[in-house]
Image (tube, grey):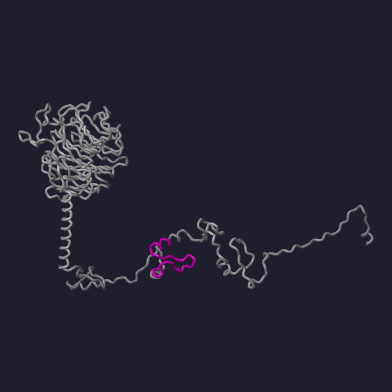
Amino acid sequence: MDLFGQYGSDDEPSYAPAVLKKQKIEAAPEVSTRDLTTFNYLPGLTTKEIAHNVPYQDLARPTQGPQNPFATQVSAPNRNVLTGYVEDFAMSNHHFDAMSRTYNNFGYAIDPNSNGDVYVGDVAKAAAQKGATIYETVKVKDKRKRKGAGDPADVEGYAGPWAGYEGERVHVEAVGPTEAEREAAEAASAASEASKKARAKASVDEATGNETSIFHGKEECDYLGRTYMHVPTDLDVDLLAESGIKDCYLPKQLIHTWTGHTQGVSAIRLFPNSAHMFLSAGMDGKVKLWDVYHDRRCLRTFLGHSKGVRDITFNNDGTRFLTASYDKYVKLWDTETGKCISAYTTKRIPYCVKFNPDADKQHIFLTGCADKKIYQFDMNTGDVTQEYDQHLGAVNTITFVDDNRRFVTTSDDKTLRAWEFDIPVVIKYVAEPSMHSMPAVTLHPTKKWLACQSLDNQIVIYSARDRFRMNRKKTFRGHLVAGYACEPSFSPDGRFVSSGDSEGRVWFWDWKTCKVLTKFKAHDKVVIGSVWHPHETSKLFTCSWDGTIK
């Protein structure tokens, strides 16, 4: 049999048995067996994996070695935010908000690295409130005890539900100054008030002691003893007739130019009823009285303001007038004699001044100032009798409406407010997002409408009755007045609306159709005011910042 096994051919392949090798599998990773107690392993900041069982104390040690003086937070190896490294911490949004609100309200919060027994912030308060959060209530142990109700049979001793608390102090005498101390304080207060009034009066007297006036003419009276206050009767026009009874026409040519102011003219006012004279307020601090007829010359110059005059106004009969100046004074003048009767001040710049038109209230006037208030003065006493304080900006205009029972004011706060006279409460407040400041307002001859010069280059119309609504069908556009308080005006018959603009032109509109009728160049600078003559059919007065009146 062995021979058969050894029998074979060289051509046949040999079938030798295969030898299988077993692979050795190691489940544990390769770990250094070196004793770590013999050296300290210091991993780098950029190390992601560690092949040694390093103790936690070694991992928590600070970075060893000298500090790089040129290193910045931007070059930090573990930087994950703009300013450095922020470590992630697992915390719910509710717990974070609770701790944040607790710290903002109570001054303490739980340390997130602790097990909830360590606090940061006001530890004493946390211990007093037992670590209560903002969402937890702290029960107060020291609850006050009520006194006994008493025996109902005892009428005088029975307290019932009105019994107080134990330790409560009732019927305790008030602690305060004695009668002598109170009298001394009142006397000191009265003396201080008297000294303030004396200083204010002294300042007014100092500012009002140099008023003068210059009469420009040969004689103040004619051969009949009449002054320039007398209404001329030797004219073709009846100056004492009712205004607006004749049809008016548009002016076509220049008649006369009055010159005399060295700076711009801020306002002109015609003499009441007759309009045979007019006043002009200049930025040179002078007020001039001019003659409309005859020689058309300057009759008198009133000197008394140290700065420009902003506004002027006549009383009903024209015997007196008020001037409001940038020197913070309002002064009362006599038209005929040129004397300054009195001066008033609120220590603020007055932007407008107006007499009460009622015949029995000619001793009262209103002035709107830069401190957002309207002051009501009594000329008999010189005191402020009322203050209207609702505006949020400087008061620009005051216009009496509704038979002088009410007045309308406009301001830099882009609002229009209506008031009851002598009652400092707004009865109508008009303000819209599209409104602009309205620094000039004129009343229609029918006294039913208010023409307000808006700084968005248009004249808007408001009702002068109870509702003070805007008439959106009547809007006059075309002129350029942005930034200037150009005063609009009406013809005596109410057919035409006129206004100056910033380019020295005068514009005319038709009241019914709101169409532009004509415009012409009148001055070299802005035309700040325009007034129609109440008795002439086609005469218009204009004043400009070029110092002329036409």
Q: How many marks?
A: 0
Kindly indicate the quadrant of the structure image that contains residue 408: top left
Quadrant where the image shows the C terminus: top left
275 in the magenta segment: no
Q: Is residue 471 above or below residue 210?
A: above
Q: Quadrant of the N terminus?
A: bottom right
Pick out the residue farthest to the front: 218
Residue sitting at 20 percent across and 68 percent down?
A: 176
Residue 461 visible from this viewpoint: no
> Which quadrant of the view contains residue 455?
top left
* Whether residue 10 can be seen here: yes
In this view, 272 is above or below 304: above
Task: Give the x, y percent position of residue 63.
Answer: 56, 65
Decide which of 48, 296 is in the foreground and name it: 296
Position above or below: 175 against 518: below
Could you say where residue 110 lies in the image, as x and y percent from the top left? 45, 66
Camera-side residue: 488 or 112?
488
Q: Is residue 110 magenta?
A: yes
Residue sticking out furthest to the left = 224
Residue that lies at the very extreme toward the right in this rendered image? 3
Q: Is residue 199 left or right of residue 128?
A: left
Span shown in magenta: 98-125
Query: Residue 391 location in percent, x, y?
Result: 25, 47
Residue 224's x, y, as percent?
4, 34
